[in-house]
Amino acid sequence: MKTAVEIRRHFASDNYAGICPEAWAALAEANQGHAVSYGDDSWTARAADLIREVFETPCEVFFVFNGTAANSLSLASTGQSYHSVLCHEFAHVETDECGAPEFFSNGMKVLQVPGTNGKIDPAGIERMVKKRSDIHYPKPRAVSLTQATEVGTVYSVEEVKAIRAKTKPLGLTLHMDGARFANAVASLSVKPKAITWQAGVDVLCFGGTKNGTPVGDAVVFFNRDLAEEFDYRCKQAGQLCSKMRFLSAPWVGLLQDGAWLRNAVRANAMAQRLHDALKEIPEIKILFPTQANAVFADLPPHVIVALRQAGWKFYTFIGQGGCRLMCAWDTTEDDVDRFVADLKRLLSEAPKEISLRAADHRKL
């Protein structure tokens, strides 16, 4: 008989984490007997109602397989192929969707707006809209915010309202990519409605996968007019799940007793613990404020190599030495402390010694 092997929790992505117990229990319960297909089941109805309760407002809710589909289809619903979407230059819809927003909107162009710490500068929205008005320019129709941002920062209620103050008079729809929306809510300690529909958000892509569900995100239309025929858009894009209860049931488990928020609080707390430990190390530079469940830090390149040789997984995609360290709903204090201990140990070793190890490793 094979013995169980401990699988180390890593800091590469909150997608690495498994299904949280509450979502797993609901999924198992939904697997009893038969249920009506294509979303006409009690689990999907209950999950949608729970989302309405969380946001304390009537809204249209659709479940899709992943965040790419949620973002791309919801943005496509905001305009026509000759329109454009404004987003931050680091936004996920720009950098990590493989052109899916443009594809599913039949050509709607994504245009970049600058801003510090991964957040859109509201003044940049007006500049992009008014820089040209001729027929040769893809007319801006929507603004997309990433909440929490791709560099781990969070838009405050006031910041979302400031952006809405720009979009509304310009006739722009306000879209929110909330792959880590739960982490933003936990960070701000506000009600979900405060940073969505009360602040002027028209449509939210509410992420569940990074918060403990096995698969599936929710598209939440606060502007219900935008949801017209969205079910057809989902079907055409291959997002209408025949056994929809297996997408929606985990949401019931996540939402019904507040596990979604507890999971986010936990992940954020672990990121803060990691941040606090790293900022005390002279050789480490924190690159962005830690406001959600990610820490961005600049590490010596030789230490990055050594950490990976020691078995740690994390991403480096923001320039040489820049590392993203992502905490998940199941990250523990011990995970953080072991990583920091390894980091300190490897920093104390001579770079030459580590480089020799790297060379030996490449030969294997």
Image: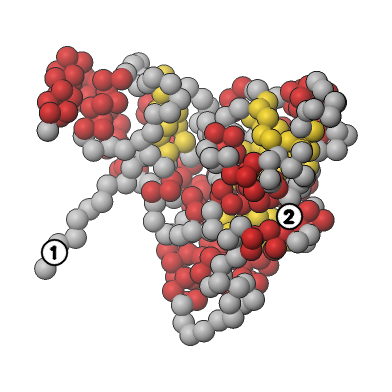
Residue at 18%, 19% in the rendered image: 355
Q: Is residue 104 left or right of residue 251?
A: right
- Name the amino acid, label 1: Lys
Instruction: Residue 34 in the image: state x and y as whole percent.
Output: 52, 84
- Looking at this view, is 50 or 236 the one in front? 236
- Name the amino acid, label 2: Phe
Mark 2 vs mark 1, CA separation in Å: 49 Å
Label 1 CA crowd tier, 10 Å (few <14, some 14–19, many 20+): few
Judging by the rendered image, the residue that carries numbered circle 2 is 221
Q: How is the image coloured?
A: secondary structure
First in sequence: mark 2 or mark 1? 1
Judging by the rendered image, the residue that carries numbered circle 1 is 2
Instruction: Residue 362 in the image: state x and y as whole percent.
Output: 17, 28
Q: Is residue 355 left or right of residue 276?
A: left
Residue at 67%, 34% in the rendered image: 110
**Element assignment for label 2:** strand
Instruction: Residue 117 in the image: state x and y as whole percent.
Output: 58, 25
Q: Quadrant of residue 87?
A: top right
> Quadrant where the N terminus lies?
bottom left
> Quadrant where the C terminus lies?
top left
- Looking at this view, is 63 or 195 the one in front? 63
Q: Quadrant of residue 148?
A: top right
- Looking at this view, is 38 or 83 the one in front? 83
Residue at 68%, 58% in the rendered image: 233
- Please identify the residue farthest to the bottom as the structure is shown: 33
Q: Is residue 173 left or right of residue 42?
A: right
Instruction: Residue 306 in the image: state x and y as whole percent.
Output: 23, 27
